[in-house]
Image: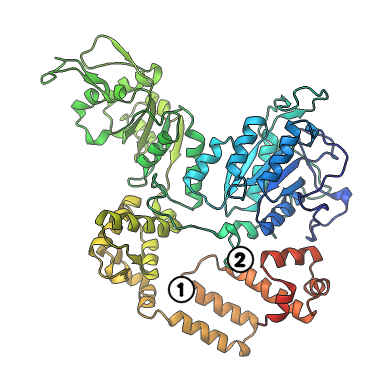
């Protein structure tokens, strides 16, 4: 446990007082507060989290959440300020006891970005875990985060409960730091190893409920607020030139893939990529190679299903001159060509049973014989295999060697089919439409919302490859600058009758606006519950999702503005009218970007 002094420490680099929670479930006396400590340390020494984010509203929400979860939170508006304090510790200007137990930082901030900060911390305080969060949740951000030594990577939006669990794991992972009393060599601190990675080693000491009450605030970070200016809402358009890997996705399934690539890229371990045809298995294999220490060495991709069975051994291992009819020269195989780099064996389930035995030997000791050769050839190759088949079933059928299966199945990385992540289709379609326009040397065409909606509901049995082909087809065949429903290829229109309302929406684009106007014009004759129900029904009919996340901030905005109008802009009076504490009202004003003066002027 890091030893902390008893002196009061400010909770922020620009605030001297601690935040006070107005949540009734959390607002208890000091004797009943939840406290999280490291390695069962005394209760009066809670674990310390440094929180770094330049978004004031998000920083307040996160600080409040982690304090409710039993942590001592110190907030910073930028990484430069946190770096200054750590550097003071490094230079012995501050006590080593001031080090935190974990750091949570954003990536994109002024002066010093989170990745540079994480890299510096990892170099000078290698045992200090850092969790990186970012709204730019792409493959590059994930890989860069892990390459700087980050403990974990949190793509925004994230659920607050998940964030708390991640911080708990980071605290538990961190070895106990013993305080050096001598003045010599203060900067890396003495470490003792914590033997367990379970949450049971974290001492949580509530008087009653042992779980933090987070549900009331989870939506503030887990879902973006469409009316605010939080950077968590920033979803920049993906350009074909800005994404050389071609791996795109904001869905949770793809974030899991990004994390896996980030963790596995620097490891020489064998990876088995599974997934349906067209899900991007070769792209993932290439990304693992391009971000690995082997990236300057060859990446050789070989599809087992595309090679005649009687030529596979020669293709993989090479052959000596005269080994068989037509072997007029000695030829290197793919293993020798990939020496020092990566060999990607696609559709490994189609490899002949006899060849599987030879591959097993290479995986065991890195040696093989060329066809017709007498001398062993030794290579250093990382193997990445992929298949769309069920290898376990092939093993049961006797078509795939069980020992080879276990050699390959060290780390399995499953890729999700496109139909399970429809939220990624708009970004993917935009990317492929851009790339198709570049290939055809033509203007980029835009997808009509209804056409895009039909694409999101399509099954996509060919997955991302099929979507790419459709975008290329649309670029060539569709007339005009906007792709309408009638321009979609026949296979997408086959089940259009089941989505007739969406098709009619294209022909009557103003219908939703007319109905919304009707709702507003008749709102005086409806109760607010009826008006809200009518709005929700209309939103769902037009294909909107996450409507609760859209409605909640607007609902709070209306009530908050009304209370400020009624109280003449007096915050304490408005808070009492709403049943909130003053701190909660202040936080809501910041989150919703409302001033007390503005609240008096706005009328709904």
Residue drawn at the location 62% of the way across and 31% of the way down: 123
Give 162 or 50, whichever is nearer the viewer: 50
x, y (%) of residue 136? 52, 51
Compared across the picture, whether 429 is left or right of 179 comes to: left
x, y (%) of residue 259? 51, 41
Q: Is residue 55 above or below residue 576?
A: above
N-terminal of the two: label 1 or label 2?
A: 2
Q: Secondary structure at mark 1?
A: loop
Residue drawn at the location 53% of the way across and 35% of the way down: 147
Look at the image and tell me whether residue 107 can be seen: yes
The quadrant of the rendering that contains the N terminus is top right
Look at the image and tell me whether residue 126 can be seen: no
x, y (%) of residue 112? 62, 45
Please say if the residues under marks 1 and 2 sit with CB atoms less than 8 Å apart.
no
Q: Which residue has dot 2 on it?
A: 228
Q: Which residue has dot 1 on it?
A: 542
Give 87 or 175, whichever is nearer the viewer: 87
Compared across the picture, whether 548 is left or right of 32 comes to: left
x, y (%) of residue 563? 76, 77
Q: CA separation, marks 1 and 2?
A: 23 Å
Q: Secondary structure at mark 2?
A: loop
């Amino acid at each position: 446990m890091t030893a902390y002094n008893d002196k009061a420490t400010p909770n922020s680099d620009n605030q001297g007082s601690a935040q006070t929670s107005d949540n009734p479930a959390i607002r208890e006396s000091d004797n009943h507060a939840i406290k999280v400590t490291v390695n069962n340390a005394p209760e009066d020494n809670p674990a310390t989290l440094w929180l770094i984010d330049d978004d004031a509203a998000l920083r307040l929400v996160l600080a409040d959440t982690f304090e409710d979860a039993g942590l001592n939170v110190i907030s910073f508006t930028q990484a430069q300020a946190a770096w200054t304090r750590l550097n003071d510790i490094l230079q012995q200007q501050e006590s080593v006891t001031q080090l935190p137990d974990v750091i949570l930082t954003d990536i994109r901030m002024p002066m010093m970005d989170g990745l540079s900060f994480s890299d510096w911390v990892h170099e000078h305080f290698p045992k200090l875990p850092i969790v990186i969060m970012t709204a730019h949740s792409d493959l590059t951000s994930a890989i860069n985060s892990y390459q700087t030594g980050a403990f974990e990577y949190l793509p925004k939006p994230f659920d607050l409960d998940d964030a708390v669990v991640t911080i708990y794991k980071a605290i538990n992972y961190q070895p106990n730091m013993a305080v050096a009393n001598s003045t010599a060599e203060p900067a890396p601190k003495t470490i003792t190893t914590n033997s367990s990675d379970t949450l049971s080693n974290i001492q949580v000491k509530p008087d009653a409920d042992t779980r933090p009450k987070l549900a009331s605030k989870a939506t503030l970070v887990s879902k973006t607020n469409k009316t605010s200016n939080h950077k968590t809402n920033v979803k920049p358009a993906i350009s074909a030139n800005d994404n050389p890997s071609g791996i795109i996705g904001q869905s949770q399934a793809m974030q899991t893939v990004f994390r896996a690539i980030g963790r596995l890229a620097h490891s020489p371990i064998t990876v088995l990529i599974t997934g349906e045809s067209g899900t991007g298995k070769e792209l993932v294999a290439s990304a693992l190679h391009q971000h690995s220490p082997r990236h300057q060495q060859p990446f050789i991709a070989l599809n087992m299903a595309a090679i005649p069975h009687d030529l596979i051994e020669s293709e993989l291992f090479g052959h000596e001159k005269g080994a068989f009819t037509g072997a007029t020269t000695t030829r290197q195989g793919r293993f020798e060509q990939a020496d020092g780099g990566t060999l990607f064996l696609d559709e490994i389930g189609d490899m002949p049973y006899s060849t599987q035995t030879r591959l097993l030997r290479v995986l065991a000791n890195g040696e093989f014989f060329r066809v017709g050769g007498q001398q062993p050839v030794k290579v250093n190759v990382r193997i990445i295999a992929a298949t769309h088949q069920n290898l376990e079933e092939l093993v049961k059928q006797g078509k795939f060697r069980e020992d080879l299966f276990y050699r390959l199945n060290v780390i399995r990385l499953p890729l999700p089919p496109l139909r399970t992540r429809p939220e990624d289709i708009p970004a993917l379609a935009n990317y492929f439409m851009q790339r198709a326009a570049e290939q055809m040397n033509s203007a980029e065409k835009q997808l009509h919302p209804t056409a895009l909606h039909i694409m999101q509901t399509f099954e996509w049995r060919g997955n991302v490859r099929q979507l790419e082909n459709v975008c290329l087809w649309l670029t060539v065949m569709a007339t005009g600058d906007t792709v309408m429903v009638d321009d979609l290829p026949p296979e997408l229109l086959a089940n259009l009758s089941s989505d007739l309302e969406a098709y009619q929406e294209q022909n009557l684009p103003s219908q939703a606006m007319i109905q919304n106007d009707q709702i507003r014009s008749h709102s005086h004759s409806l109760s607010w519950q009826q008006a809200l129900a009518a709005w929700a029904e209309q939103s769902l009919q037009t294909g909107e999702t996450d409507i609760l996340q859209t409605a909640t901030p607007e609902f709070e905005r209306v009530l908050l503005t009304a209370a400020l109008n009624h109280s003449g802009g007096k915050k304490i009076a408005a808070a009492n009218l709403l049943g909130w504490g003053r701190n909660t009202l202040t936080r809501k004003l910041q989150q919703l970007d409302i001033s007390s003066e503005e609240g008096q002027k706005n009328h709904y």
